[in-house]
């Protein structure tokens, strides 16, 4: 298991422990406020992907290995939502600026 930082529109910002499996478990542990609409996933390299909560709840899968936590969004609108070496998530009301292109090629 690995830990990541959680902040933004959550009841208690801080650190949570994540394990492999559905990203919905990570979201439940993060304690988002009801109005939160997006999760911005930040990699250790600074890469940011702002993903709608409902997409992450239904299609997000976490992997954990010696390299850290990774996120894969199954059947997501773009492969750019997949984030390696996740360091932090930030829940927000509305999409935050990210590194996903306006019109990704994949």
Image (cartoon, grey):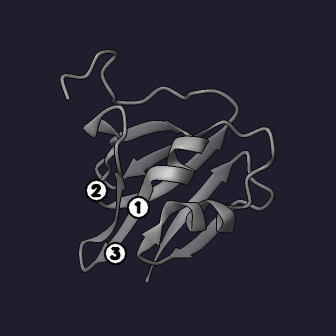
Tell which residue pokes out farthest to the bottom in this image.
Answer: 1
Spot occupied by residue 27 in the image (x, y as percentages of width and height): 62, 59
Q: Does the residue at mark 1 contact the one at mark 3 (Cβ under 8 Å)? A: no
Residue 61 numbered tag: 1
Q: How far apart are marks 1 and 2 (CA)?
A: 12 Å
> Which residue is located at x 59 percent, y 43 percent?
54
Q: How far apart are marks 3 and 2 (CA)?
A: 10 Å
Q: Mark 3 points at which residue?
A: 64
Upstream in the sequence, badge 3 or badge 2? 3
Spot occupied by residue 70 in the image (x, y as percentages of width and height): 33, 62
Residue 22 numbered tag: none
**Label 3 residue SS:** strand
**Label 1 residue SS:** strand
Tell me if I can see residue 39 in this picture.
no
Upstream in the sequence, badge 1 or badge 2? 1
> Which residue is located at x 37 percent, y 39 percent?
76
Q: Mark 2 points at which residue?
A: 84
Identify whether 33 is placed above or below 36.
below
> Which residue is located at x 31 percent, y 47 percent?
82
Mark 3 nearby-residue class (10 Å; few <14, some 14–19, many ≥20) = some
């Amino acid at each position: 298991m690995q830990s990541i930082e959680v902040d933004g529109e959550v009841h208690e910002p801080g650190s949570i422990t994540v394990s492999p499996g559905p990203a919905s478990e990570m979201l439940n542990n993060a304690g988002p406020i009801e109005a939160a609409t997006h999760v911005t996933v930040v990699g250790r390299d600074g890469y940011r992907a702002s993903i709608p909560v409902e997409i992450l709840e239904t299609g997000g899968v976490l992997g954990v290995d010696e390299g850290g936590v990774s996120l894969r969004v199954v059947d997501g609108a773009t492969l750019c939502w997949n984030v390696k070496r996740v360091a932090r998530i930030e829940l927000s009301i509305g999409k935050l600026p990210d590194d996903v292109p306006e019109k990704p090629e994949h």
